[in-house]
Amino acid sequence: MTNTMKSKERLQVTTPSAREIAMTRVFAAPRTMVWSALTKPELVKRWLGVRAGWTLPVCEIDLKVGGSYRYVWRGPKGQEMGMGGVYREIVVPERMVATEVFDQKWYDGDALDTTVLVEKGGKTTLTTTVLYASQKVRDAVLESPMKEGVGEGYEKLEEVLASIAARGVK
Amino acid sequence: MAPDRLNATFAALADPTRRAILARLASGKASVTELAEPFAMTQPAISKHLKVLERAGLISRGRDAQRRPRQLEAKPLAEATKWLERYRRYWEGNYERLDALLEVMKTTPKKRRPTKR
């Protein structure tokens, strides 16, 4: 095994469908270790959303199908943000599916999170896909007279926004 | 940005015809007839798309009473871009902290493993 210099891995944000956002990132660690960091409360508390004075004082994980999880973040001014959900599928250490609901609804409906871990050569590729249940977004897709292209989603959107920005709209 | 407004923006942008209309409007105002030209669609079909874009605040109508040219409203687009950027930055931060944690875990012996020797 070669001991290569570690370069900063790149986060890829893609859109498998109009209702989904997927994030892919490679971690220089075996899959079991990444799985632990994602599912053990004492480890989750050390990285998830804990920045700029925010902490994760409540982190409860009942890792079984039908079990629930609950996260509450606390901000520097005492403000709180909570979310949670229920595990639908668990395949240690490669896959889990869970619902996602925020206490303060910043989007419509529940979302479904699918986490997949693939290990290759000692590195782990983590892919997290969030399927949004927003009725407005879904209805817009159903109403669309054009079947083709509905799955392009946000990635395409970014391109369009970039091209629009490049043309210098004020 | 209000969640409803953001939803309306993303819903409006989920359709390829509407994205194409926005791209066309980025190069200047255009009438409904002009906007319908590049698409194999009837004017009413195009008008329906324009209504969705208008409701989302992405476009507005010009003063000219005859042509009612549509024009791009850049602010909601900028807000949608900002939202995506925030999303990406938030997760980049999370994953950088996770990198650091994994490095620590690699050098820390597992608790459950019985100590040898």
Image (tube, coloured by chain):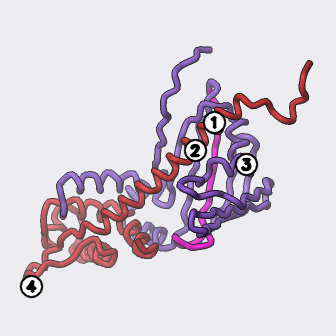
Chain colours: A purple, B red
Note whether residue B66 is visible.
yes
Verify CB contact (< 8 Å) between mark 4 and mark 3.
Answer: no
Residue A14 horizontal/vertical position (percent) = 46, 48
Q: Distance between the residues labelled 1 and 3?
A: 16 Å
The mark that comes first in sequence, 1 or 3, is 3
Q: Please, which chain is the residue tagged with disc 4 on?
A: B
The residue under label 1 is: A118
Crowdedness near tag 2: few (<14), some (14–19) or many (≥20) residues, C-alpha within 10 Å:
many
Query: For the residue labelled by badge 4, is the local secondary structure a helix, a strand or a loop?
Result: loop
Residue A124 horizontal/vertical position (percent) = 62, 34
Name the kind of residue labelled 1 in the image: Val
Image quadrant occupied by the C terminus of chain A: bottom left
In this rendering, do the residues under marks 1 and 2 share a single chain?
A: yes
Verify CB contact (< 8 Å) between mark 1 and mark 2.
Answer: yes
Provide the residue span drawn in magenta.
Answer: A103-120
Residue B51 horizontal/vertical position (percent) = 29, 78
The residue under label 2 is: A127
The residue under label 3 is: A39
Residue B76 colored magenta?
no
In front: label 1 or label 3: 3
In this rendering, do the residues under marks 2 and 4 share a single chain?
A: no
Crowdedness near tag 1: few (<14), some (14–19) or many (≥20) residues, C-alpha within 10 Å:
some
Residue in the picture at 31% in, 51% down? A159
Name the kind of residue labelled 2 in the image: Thr
Query: For the residue labelled by badge 1, is the local secondary structure a helix, a strand or a loop?
Result: strand
Query: For the residue labelled by badge 2, is the local secondary structure a helix, a strand or a loop?
Result: strand
Residue B65 badge = 4
Q: How far apart are marks 2 and 4 (CA)?
A: 52 Å
Residue A106 colored magenta?
yes
